[in-house]
Amino acid sequence: MRFVVSVLLLSALTVLTVRCTQADTAEAEAPKTYLFLGHTYDWLAEGRVDPRLELIDYSQFDGVWLGGDVCARTSKSETTLQYLDSLFQLSDPNTHWSWGNHDLLEGDSSLLLRYTERPSYYTYYEAGLLMIVLNTNLFWHHTWAPPHENCAAKEKQYHWLKNVLDTVSTASEVLILHHHGLLNEFKTTADGTPLNLGNVDAIPVRPLCDSTSNFTTDIYPKLRAIRQRGIGLTMLSGDVGMRSKGYAITIADSITMLGSGINNNLDMRDPAYYVTNFEPDSVLLLSYTPARGALTWEFRHLSNWVLEDFIDPEVARQKPRLWAILSEY
């Protein structure tokens, strides 16, 4: 009798193990999908995002990644953070946000810390994908010498980043989420002409108060070392939309640079002089398959996507400003 019970118990455990293994395999082979949104603010309402983004069902994604400048004055009022939290679930483990300059403009960074429940820069690891989220507001993006401000904070992030990059070993893919453009020296035509892809493409970017510091010189060799260890590497920037709607560039050592941002909710009849691109806005959809360690992406025409999946065109026509934006004016 004990033998029969033992056999039955062993059989049950075997079936359970097989089912768990199959479930784990299926989960590893199922791609995870992420939506990346950059430069999302509404030009006409400082505490709101582009009206098209309010219509999207974000629950369909495994994660939402924000590339900064979420609102024009994101942390000026707690009401704005409450509104954003209702859209993006800011403290959710799968929502990640690299702060932009507009997220701090006339604002209070403690609100961002409280609602996200995360520091301004950090790492997040899941199923072979290591995300490094930077606070590029601590970098200097101008041609003149950086002021001696926040020097200790800059040093802390800089040394933290170098240590993270030096110790990456188990990931199959590293994704660096940042707002301001980085490695801008590589965003050129074949003859070296700058492509002007980001809203600001500073050369060089100074990560420290030291006027001789240089992000590309200091950090790029560490990125190359990661690729040489067989780990994929992608840079993802959100300070885009005014001079281009997005880009995908592969540079030496197969390092990928992606950028995406939206901007067409401004008044097209009187745009700011520094806005030069009025092509339709796009957002970036990314897919990661843990079993293969593969990250892929596609740009999606924002207005078409919203009209096809999230709102009836006849309903949209009843809202003049929304319809103007959906029609890209």
Image (cartoon, grey):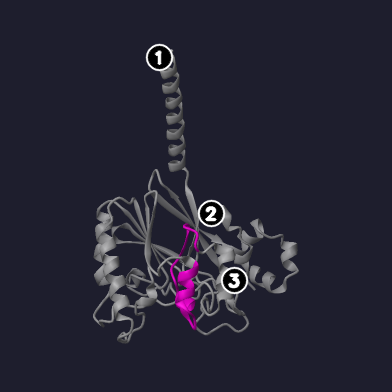
- Report the residue at 43% width, 29% height from top: 18
Q: Earlier in the sequence, mark 1 or mark 3?
A: 1
Q: Is residue 99 above or below residue 293?
A: below
Indicate whether residue 29 is drawn in magenta.
no
Nearest to viewer (mark 3 / mark 2):
2
Circle 3 is placed at which residue position? Answer: 50
Marks 1/2: CA–CA distance: 49 Å
On the image, the x and y values in percent for residue 92 come to 50, 59
Residue type at the position of mark 2: Phe
Nearest to viewer (mark 1 / mark 2):
1
Q: Which mark is residue 61?
A: 2
Nearest to viewer (mark 1 / mark 3):
1
Numbered range of the magenta stretch: 91-115
Q: Earlier in the sequence, mark 1 or mark 2?
A: 1
Residue type at the position of mark 3: Asp
Element at label 1: helix
- The crowding category of the residue bearing disc 2, from other C-alpha atoms within 10 Å (few below 14, some 14 to 19, many at least 20), is some
Is 189 placed left or right of 101 in the picture?
A: left
Image quarter (top left, top right, bottom left or bottom right) of the C terminus: bottom right
- Report the residue at 48% width, 70% height from top: 114
Residue 265 is at least partly visible in this image: yes
Marks 3/2: CA–CA distance: 19 Å
Q: Which mark is residue 3?
A: 1
